[in-house]
Image (cartoon, helix red, strand yellow):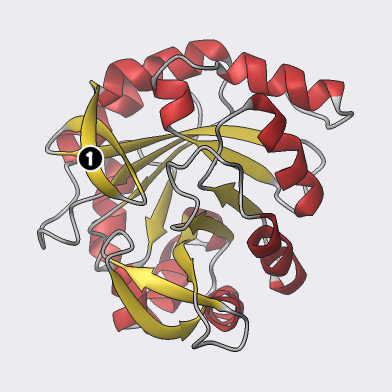
Amino acid sequence: MSVVTRVIPCLDVAAGRGVKGVNFENLREMGDPVELARRYFEQGADEVTFLDVTATVEERGTMYDVVQRTAEEVFIPLTVGGGVRTDEDVARLLGVGADKVGVNSAAIRRPALLNEIADRFGAQVLVLSLDVKRSPRTPSGFVVTTHGGRQETDLDALAWAREAIERGAGELLVNSIDADGTKQGFDLELVGLMREVATVPVIASGGAGDVSHFAPAVRAGADAVLAASVFHSGQMTVGDVKSALRTEGIPVR
């Protein structure tokens, strides 16, 4: 769908520090998210995604001060998610420097929130964040989860993605909870199915462990590829990923 594939580091944050776990559990500290974001900006990241991974679980708002400090250091698009419950939360995040806002649990509880955000700010601001697990309970074989993958809903992932786009979501951030943190590669079946139903860009997330994992996700239908721990640990740089994509004939900036 996109002419150029975006490479997006993700900053999972809890209590103001960068963290990473496996399957969203056993979170360990990875450093200052502002310093990490600056590093990725210097490496040539196309965007940075900032997810407050415990905001919904702890029933509190996103840490606006961290968002603001990050935005002051990073001059590429910044997507922020976690704890967004109202269009006023979106207004405040945009006010401290976010360019796009990811919504997950609150939209599942009240889907009209998507309409409200898109109507007020435009679809280009609204990212539907999907934490998806494989499940025999749904027609597609994939179910939407909330609270960082801790709670399964009754929503079929593909049906929910389609509805969210109709309500105004301008982008889908599709994270495989099964693959998250495993470093075994993206869930290509999930990416491909999302591409079939989506009329907006699809960001593939969850499972990157080697530079060779990114090109297959793009070929499966991803417009952008997102990773966290492999960048935080220094295992690879944004430049390494872009070089690997270029070698595979995939255009990058």
- The kind of secondary structure element at disc 1 is strand
* Point 10% across, 57% down: residue: 60
- Percent position (x, y) of residue 176? 50, 57
- Percent position (x, y) of residue 213? 67, 36
Please state which of residues 248 and 128 is positioned toward the viewer in this rendering. 248
* Point 53% across, 67% down: residue: 169
- Percent position (x, y) of residue 16? 15, 33
* Point 48% across, 18% down: residue: 41
**Quarter of the image where the C terminus is located:** top right
Is residue 5 at all visible to an observer of this figure?
Answer: no
How many numbered discs, if any? 1
| Amino acid type, callout 1 | Leu
The residue wearing badge 1 is 27
Q: Is residue 201 above or below residue 137?
A: above
- The picture quadrant where one finds residue 45 is top right
Q: Is residue 138 above or below residue 117?
A: below
- The picture quadrant where one finds residue 18 is top left
Please state which of residues 17 and 77 is positioned toward the viewer in this rendering. 17
- The picture quadrant where one finds residue 239 is top right
Is residue 84 at all visible to an observer of this figure?
Answer: yes
* Point 28% across, 21% down: residue: 34
For mark 1, does the 10 Å Cα neighbourhood hold few (<14), some (14 to 19), or many (20 or more) residues?
Answer: some
Horizontal side of 102 relative to 7 (left or right) equals: left
Q: Is residue 42 above or below residue 251?
A: above
Horizontal side of 143 relative to 33 (left or right) equals: right
- Percent position (x, y) of residue 130? 46, 64
